[in-house]
């Protein structure tokens, strides 16, 4: 395929390596997880843990794990895996094309006996288009191929690489409402100031459709996250104490990452009628000189 090589990656897992005229990207078929995006001549945009677990059926710590069809814990089934099953299933590589120097890779996942037997019995079709140019484009299409409406949550759980999370400012979430997962799911209001993280942060910002910009003074750059079809933005960093209990993170990794996630979750769960489709996209790019 043009600009795309399939190869054996970490842990013997299959991945697509994309080299466009502008950037390099790695996409593991496990979970359709984009683990690397690096515009030529720039530093990597995504954080990937050196301690990530690379094994069939395990979520990869870093890059962009793809969360579907529920976000966080399942609402009624405590045995169902956190963040759904899409991030741990093996997706199919459907093809690729090059348009104006941008390489577009398409992956797919459908329901099967195992997914229907689990906590989400619906027939569905997912298509994930990853476009690699100056911008990393991620488009998740959900098709309801069953005969009844279903509800789903989804997230592009993006781990952005930062110089020091304590020195970043995130704009785009001012004057919005969030569910504070580190304070008993209390609903709170974000003030008029950019968001600066000062401790463990796990916030589900509902009704948020705007661009987020991560200003990183340490790496002297700005990471821009634009989106469509997404009404939720999640910001997460476990900070030092929580991170120490996460086996697939190195002790200091929490400083080098911040998750700014393009999502539809909580209040913004999507109801999709039979035969209908829904598309959520994220466009991530780096702008030098913060
Ligand atoms: O998006 C934030 C979050 O839901 C947090 O609550 C946190 O636990 C994180 O995802 C990571 O989840 P994971 O299952 O990948 O360890």
Image: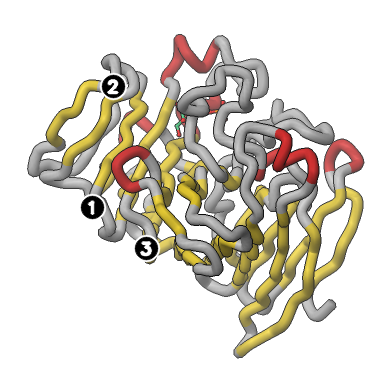
Q: Position of residue 181 (x, y in %)?
A: 33, 23
Q: Position of residue 143 (x, y in %)?
A: 57, 64
Q: Nearer the viewer, residue 214 or 7?
A: 7
Q: How is the image coloured?
A: secondary structure
Number of labels in the image equals: 3
Q: Secondary structure at mark 2?
A: loop
Residue 221 is drawn in which quadrant? bottom left
Q: Residue at x 56, y 18 (%)?
A: 78
Q: Is residue 56 above or below residue 15?
A: above
Mark 3 highlights which residue?
Answer: 226
Q: Is mark 2 within 8 Å of ligand 1?
A: no
Q: Is residue 99 above or below residue 32?
A: below
- For the question of whether residue 38 can be seen, the reply is no
* CA–CA distance in space, label 2 to label 1: 21 Å
Mark 1 highlights which residue?
Answer: 172
Q: Is mark 1 within 8 Å of ligand 1?
A: no
Q: Is residue 130 above or below residue 62?
A: below
Residue furthest toward the left?
Answer: 192
Q: Residue at x 66, y 38 (%)?
A: 85
* CA–CA distance in space, label 3 to label 2: 26 Å
Quadrant of the frame with the N terminus: bottom right
Q: Nearer the viewer, mark 2 or mark 1?
A: 2
* CA–CA distance in space, label 1 to label 3: 10 Å
Contact between labelled residues 2 and 3, with CB atoms less than 8 Å apart = no
Near mark 1 (Cα within 10 A), the count class, few <14, some 14-19 or many ≥20, is some
Mark 2 highlights which residue?
Answer: 185
Q: Is residue 126 left or right of residue 200?
A: right
Q: Residue at x 15, y 46 (%)?
A: 174
Q: Position of residue 147 (x, y in %)?
A: 58, 60
Q: Is residue 196 left or right of residue 149?
A: left
């Amino acid at each position: 395929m043009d600009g795309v090589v399939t190869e054996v990656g970490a842990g013997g897992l299959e991945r697509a390596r994309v080299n466009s005229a502008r950037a390099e990207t790695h996409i593991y078929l496990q979970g359709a997880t984009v683990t690397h995006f690096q515009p030529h001549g720039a530093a990597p945009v995504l954080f990937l843990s050196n301690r990530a677990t690379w094994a069939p059926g395990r979520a990869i710590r870093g890059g962009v794990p793809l969360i579907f069809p529920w976000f966080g814990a399942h609402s009624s089934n405590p045995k169902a895996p956190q963040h759904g099953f899409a991030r741990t299933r093996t997706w199919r590589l459907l093809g690729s094309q090059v348009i104006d120097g941008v390489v577009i890779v398409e992956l797919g996942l459908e329901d099967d006996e195992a997914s229907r037997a689990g906590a989400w019995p619906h027939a569905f079709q997912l298509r994930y288009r990853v476009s690699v140019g100056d911008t990393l484009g991620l488009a998740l299409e959900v098709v309801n191929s069953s005969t009844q409406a279903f509800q789903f949550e989804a997230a592009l759980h993006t781990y952005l690489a930062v110089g020091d999370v304590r020195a970043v400012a995130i704009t785009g979430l001012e004057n919005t409402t969030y569910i504070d997962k580190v304070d008993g799911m209390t609903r709170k209001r974000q003030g008029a100031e950019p968001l600066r993280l000062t401790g463990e942060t796990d916030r589900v910002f509902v009704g948020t459709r705007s661009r987020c910009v991560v200003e990183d003074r340490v790496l002297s750059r700005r990471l821009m996250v634009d989106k469509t079809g997404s009404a939720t933005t999640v910001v997460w960093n476990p900070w030092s104490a929580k991170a120490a209990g996460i086996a697939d993170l190195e002790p200091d990794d929490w400083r080098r990452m911040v998750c700014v996630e393009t999502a539809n979750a909580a209040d913004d769960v999507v109801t999709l009628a039979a035969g209908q489709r829904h598309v959520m996209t994220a466009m991530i790019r780096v702008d030098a000189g913060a």
